[in-house]
Amino acid sequence: MTVSFRVLRFVMVLLLVAYVVSGVFIVRQDEKAFVLMFGKVAGLGAERVKGPGIHWTFPRPISDIVRVKSEQVQAVESATFAFAATDPMQLAAPGKEGYSLTGDANLMHSRWVLRYQIADPEAYLFRVRDNRAVLLRELDHAVTKSSGRFAIDRALRTDIEAFRGAVAEEVTQRCQALGLGVQIVGVELQVVAPPRAVADAFNEVVAAEQERSEKISAARGYASRAVNEAHGQAAKLLAEGEAYQRRTVSEVSADADYFNKVYTEYVKNPDVIARTLLQDTLRRTLAGVENKFILPDDATGKQELRLLLNREQQSPWTVKKPEAPPN
């Protein structure tokens, strides 16, 4: 009997040690944990949240461990407004297709993904029973509300990013107001499309607008090139005109100075200056003439000098008249 009691006490001690040791638990790096003692969170302040490491608490049924992936980015996907049929050629089934109503009273299909991270683990675990369901509901609410602010053309093509941003802003505000303890990382618009019954009409509109944009771009490019060429030609003409002006003014000034000097000498000695000018004129004239002819005069016995003067060069600024078209 004594040996039996000793063995029983030893076994009880082992069971007690095993029970105490079973209260040891490990929290991983991407987790946060809470100890529920008799159904309530144990600890005060920062001690309520157990960070990564080894911890101990009373084993079950006294305490229970609740873990949450606080460092992991999680996602919920909404197919509420997506096509019901998997075959893209199959038309919408009345009453089964999901869609949202745009601001100009058109139908639009879309598929969304909300990505979030747990910012307040205690609020996330204990404030709402099913956080993912609430997040999905708020995402659908944001899509429905934001769709009514956009015309279908903006939501489908021209302002897709603004539409996605409006949904993200709306769902972020709602989650903060509800205190879900999550931080919205991003909202993705995976698919957006018109109803398949009118998809061809939308595609034709898109093709027409693309063609219009291409033609407008080509016209603007041509206009830009034409303006640049016109500016270049205008600058060239202005530069040539200014150069011609300076050259002409310089020549006139030089002639005026020469005339003043000659006139002063002419007043003093008119005959001498007149003969000098005549000889200078003849010399310059003969130097510039290509053909010279000396003809004898039989009646007087003298010789006559005849010159074939060159045609006067046309000014570069003379405007030529356009040639008449052939008959």
Image: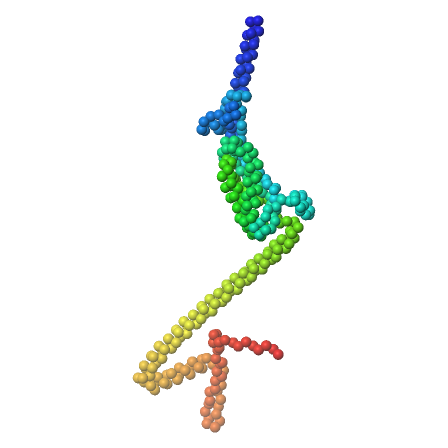
When the figure is inspected, residue 303 is found, relative to residue 98, above or below; the finding is below
- Can the viewer see residue 107 in this picture? yes
When the figure is inspected, residue 251 is found, relative to residue 278, above or below; the finding is above
Residue 118 screen position, x and y as percent: 51, 35
Q: Quadrant of the N terminus?
A: top right
Residue at left offset 64%, top offset 54%: 201
Residue 116 screen position, x and y as percent: 53, 38
Q: 304 left or right of 260? A: right
Taking the view exactly as shown, the residue that stands out farthest to the left is 268
Q: 227 left or right of 248? A: right
Residue at left offset 36%, top offset 85%: 274
Residue at left offset 49%, top offset 82%: 291
Residue at left offset 57%, top offset 57%: 213
Residue 235 screen position, x and y as percent: 46, 66
Q: Which quadrant would residue 244 be assigned to in this image?
A: bottom left
Q: 312 left or right of 272? A: right
Numbered marks: total: 0
Taking the view exactly as shown, the residue that stands out farthest to the top is 1
Residue 127 screen position, x and y as percent: 51, 33
- Can the viewer see residue 157 in this picture? no
When the figure is inspected, residue 283 is found, relative to residue 47, above or below; the finding is below
- The way the protein has been coloured in the rendering is rainbow
Q: Quadrant of the C terminus?
A: bottom right
Taking the view exactly as shown, the residue that stands out farthest to the front is 95
